[in-house]
Image (spheres, rainbow, N blue to C red):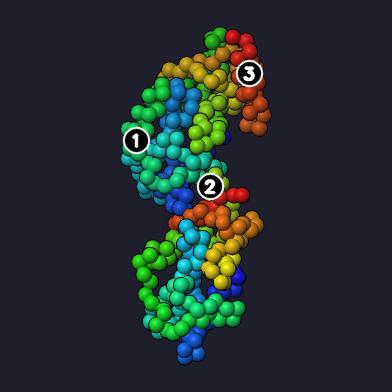
Amino acid sequence: MRTSEVMKRPVVTMAGEDVAQIKDIVYASGGGAVGGFTLAGRGLFAGPLKVGLAWRFVAALGADAVMISDDSVLQPIAEVLAESASTGGSGGDVLGSQVLTDAGTDLGKVVDIVLQVGDTQGGQCDVVGYEVEASEALGSKGTRVLIPLPDTLAASGEHLMVPARAKDFVAQDLAGFGAAILAFRAQLEGTP
Amino acid sequence: MRFSEASGRQVVSTSTAATVGKVDDFVVDPRRRAVVALVLKKTESGDTLLWSSLTAFGTDAVTVTGAEQITAPPPEIQALSGKDHRILGKRVLTTSGDDIGKVNDIEFDPETGTITALVLTGGDMAGISLVGVGSYATVVRPQ
C-alpha cells in the first residue's frame, strides 16, 4: 500500500474506540522500514497528539483502520522517535527527494512511498518502493512509476541512492509491483 | 431470537399478571458476549431489568416476578449502555483493520442471553467472533 493511503487512517482499539488518527510515518532502519506513527486527534479541529504509536504495538494495519489492543500502548512521541533512531533511522522525510542510481542517473522525484506489511505482531513493515515522477532516463517523463528498493539503501536529505538495475524493474501499478520487488531483490542477492 | 423481533415485547409480572413495561433496548457485555440487561420503556419506575432478574424470556412475553425487579441502571450496566455501546447499526471492523459493513441484527439465546450470531450487511458471523463494541466500531475476529 502507499503511505498516502495510510495517512488520516483511524487508530482503533480492540474495544472499538477510535483513539487517534495517523498523522505521519516515522521511518526506521535508514528509511527501509516503518518504525511507528505520529498521531493526531480525531475530529475536524483536533490537533496533533503528544503520544505516538511504535510499530511493534500495531496489531494490524488494515485497509480501513490501524488496530491496537488498547490505548495504553501509546507512548510519548520522543520515545517512538528514539526507538526508531536507535535502529539507524534518520526519521527524515524522503518525499520530494531525488532518486539517483549508483551509475549517476536521475530517475525522478519521490511522490509517494510503497509499504509492505510482513506478518504483524513481530513482522516488519518494510518500505519496498518509491513512487516517482519519472525523469527522462525512464523514457516516460512526467508519468508516475514505481521503483523497487533493495533491503537497505543510502539516503541523505536530498538524494536517495538505488542500484542502477532498479531501472529494469520499474512497474506502472501496484498489481505487478510485488513480483518486481521479489525479482529485483533476488537478482541483487544472486550477483554480489 | 433476534433483537429485531424481541424489541417491543411486553414485560409481564408473574405476581400481578400486569404489564410492567416494554422491551426497548438491549445492553450487551462484549467481554461475556451476552445480553446483561434489558432497557424498558413504559415502566412505572426505573428502566433497567438485569438479565439475572428476569424469570423467562418467552416467545410472546418477558416475565418477571414483580415490578420491583425493574430498577435504575447500576453503574456496571450504565458503563455498557448508551449510544457508544450500541451494537446495532454500527460499523464493523475486523481485528485486521478492514471495514466489513454494519451490524443489522443480533441473534441471542433466550435461555442464557448469550449472543449466538451477528447479522452483518455482508453475511452472518458467529457470536464468538465479537471482540469489542466502542464509539467508533464493533470489532470482530474473522474465523
Task: Tell me the SS state at disc 3.
Answer: helix
Q: Position of residue A163 (x, y in %)?
A: 56, 13
Report the Cα–Cα distance between label 2 and label 1.
25 Å
Residue type beneath disc 1: Ile
* Quadrant position of the N terminus of chain A in the picture: top right
Residue type beneath disc 3: Ala
Specify the label residue B52 is tagged with.
none
Which residue: 57% across, 59% down? B127
Residue carrying label 2: B95
Q: Are marks 3 and 1 in contact (CB under 8 Å)?
A: no
Residue carrying label 3: A186
The nearer-to-camera label among 3 and 1 is 3
Residue type beneath disc 2: Thr
Mark 3, Cα crowd under 10 Å, few <14 / some 14-19 / many 20+, is few
Report the Cα–Cα distance between label 3 and label 2.
33 Å
Q: Are marks 3 and 2 in contact (CB under 8 Å)?
A: no
Mark 1, Cα crowd under 10 Å, few <14 / some 14-19 / many 20+, is many
Task: Tell me the SS state at disc 2.
Answer: loop
Which residue: 55% across, 32% down? A118
Of the residues under marks 3 and 1, which one precedes in the sequence?
1
The reply to whether residue A167 is in sight is: no
Q: Position of residue B62 (x, y in %)?
A: 53, 79
| B130, above or below A81, in the image | below
Residue carrying label 1: A77
The answer to which image quadrant residue A53 occupies is top left
